[in-house]
């Protein structure tokens, strides 16, 4: 949009339900952008912000207008727009985009209360991550690029069980009940945002194992909108064609159930899109570099950068499958988009004829 083009700070929106991989994605993204990502020094130890050399990441939970007790009293979830202050979100994101520091509220996830505000200085790249980065039209228009992590119900359930049962001691019934309780608001307020995303990472159960119950092997689709400024979709072999590719064979040995790629195009909520799909998982890094060789428009700075990033973060969830691969690729595309916008501005300031 015109507003997006005029800004000083490049603003990226990252939307997903909670527990769907936003912080994991943020770690891969800030790693690609370089310059680290640390909580603001000397501030609130419960701050949700990460500050790096290039990017600052803010969590939109900080714009909760109702604290935990107030939500409970009014029977509202955090997903409900009435529990969030979109006027303030818009004002502050716009201010940062125009180069002005703001005093942003801090929602304390430990106490469920709103803490005193923290100062946010305008960075080169501002990432706003949370439940509603594309919900409010005014905020949406400030975004230079937007990403939606679309985790299918089956997979969401499997991840929640892993985390809440194994690590937090919740019961299967209570996990199911908490997902069900959020579902109407998720469907009404969170899920519809994916229509506005420039890139969607869709995570589905595998099709390589008939009636898979385990939910460990994933089929992941990277849906990339056509015609987005500074964003050239990634492709496999031949741009604009339809390809199915099984990299396992003489050159590459994959263990059961193997790996299957697909590439093609279509429409997504009325927009032309390219789609890259990976089902299955990598056994070892050689497989990844072999795959990287066959992908184009990756926005890498050197051969093997995708594999290097994946190896560097081998400990993060999704490192052996399409979630980690596509998060890494989207990170590279964000870096490229930022560099193109920065180069354009440098041009404008050094060439008076173009002002
Ligand atoms: P959010 O920031 O959206 O709450 P996180 O990135 O913290 O999400 O991820 C929440 C949990 O979901 C992780 O601890 C992990 O158990 C699971 N998870 C996230 N991404 C993946 C993935 N790609 N593969 C498997 N599990 C994942
Ligand atoms: C979501 C929000 C959080 C909120 C949590 C629990 O995950 O992102 O900000 O704390 O829901 O909400 P509750 O109303 O139960 O505290």
Image: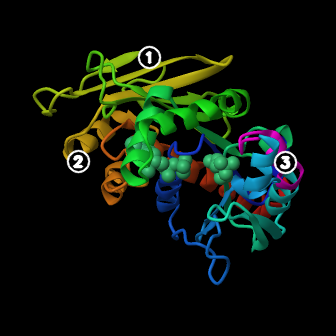
Observer-nearest residue: 223 or 50?
50
Toward the viewer: 354 or 20?
20
Q: Residue furthest bottom?
A: 42
| Mark closest to the chain's N terminus, 1 or 3 | 3
Q: Is residue 298 visible?
A: no
Q: Does the closest atom of ligand 1 sit within 8 Å of the Cβ of label 2? A: no
Tell which tag, 1 or 3, sits nearer the viewer: 3
Is residue 282 within the magenta segment? Answer: no
Q: Secondary structure at mark 2?
A: helix
Q: Which residue is mark 3?
A: 86
Above or below, 18 against 221 in this view is below
What residue did someone put label 2 on?
285
Give the alpha-carbon distance from disc 1 to disc 3, as whole Å.
42 Å
> Against 165, is 28 above or below?
below
Between 268 and 117, the one nearer to me in the picture? 117
Q: Which residue is mark 1?
A: 241
Residue occupying the point 16% across, 28% down: 256
Percent x, y of residue 246: 25, 23
Q: Are marks 1 and 3 in contact (CB under 8 Å)?
A: no
Image: magenta residue range: 76-89
Q: Residues within 10 Å of mark 2 (few under 14, many from 20)?
A: some
Q: Which residue corresponds to the image point at 66% horizontal and 32% vertical from the top-left?
A: 186
Q: Position of residue 54 (x, y in %)?
A: 60, 66
- Residue 354 lies left or right of residue 30; in this view the side is right
Quote the CA–CA distance across marks 2 and 3.
43 Å
Residue neighbourhood size for the residue with mark 1, other residues' Cα within 10 Å, grouped as few (<14), some (14–19), many (≥20): few
């Amino acid at each position: 949009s015109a507003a997006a083009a005029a800004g000083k700070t490049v603003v990226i929106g990252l939307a997903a339900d909670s527990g769907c991989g936003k912080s994991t994605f943020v770690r891969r993204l800030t790693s690609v952008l370089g310059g680290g990502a640390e909580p603001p020094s000397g501030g609130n130890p419960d701050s949700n912000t990460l500050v790096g050399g290039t990017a600052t990441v803010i969590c939109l939970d900080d714009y909760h207008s109702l604290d935990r007790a107030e939500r409970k009293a009014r029977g509202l979830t955090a997903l409900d727009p009435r529990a969030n202050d979109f006027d303030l979100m818009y004002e502050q994101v716009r201010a940062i985009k125009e180069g002005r520091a703001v005093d942003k509220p801090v929602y304390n996830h430990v106490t469920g209360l709103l803490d005193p505000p923290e100062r946010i200085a305008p960075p080169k790249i501002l990432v706003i991550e949370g439940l509603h980065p594309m919900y409010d039209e005014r905020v949406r228009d400030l975004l230079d690029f937007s990403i939606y992590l679309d985790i299918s119900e089956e997979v969401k359930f499997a991840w929640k069980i892993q985390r809440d049962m194994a690590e937090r001691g919740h019961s299967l019934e209570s996990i199911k009940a908490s997902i069900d309780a959020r579902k109407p608001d998720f469907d009404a307020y969170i899920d519809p945002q994916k229509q506005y995303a420039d890139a969607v990472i869709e995570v589905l159960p595998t099709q390589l194992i008939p009636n898979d119950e385990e939910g460990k092997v994933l089929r992941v689709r990277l849906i990339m909108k056509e015609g987005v400024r500074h964003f050239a979709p990634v492709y496999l072999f031949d741009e604009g064609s339809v390809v199915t590719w099984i990299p396992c064979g003489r050159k590459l040995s994959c263990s059961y159930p193997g790996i299957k790629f697909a590439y093609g195009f279509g429409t997504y909520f009325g927009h032309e899109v390219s789609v890259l799909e990976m089902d299955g998982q990598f056994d070892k890094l050689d497989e990844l570099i072999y795959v990287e060789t066959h992908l184009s428009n990756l926005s890498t700075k050197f051969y093997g950068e995708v594999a290097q990033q994946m190896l560097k973060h081998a400990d993060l969830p999704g490192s052996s499958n399409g979630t980690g691969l596509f998060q890494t690729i989207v990170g590279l595309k964000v870096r490229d988009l930022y560099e193109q916008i920065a180069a354009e501005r440098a041009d404008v300031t050094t060439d008076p004829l173009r002002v």
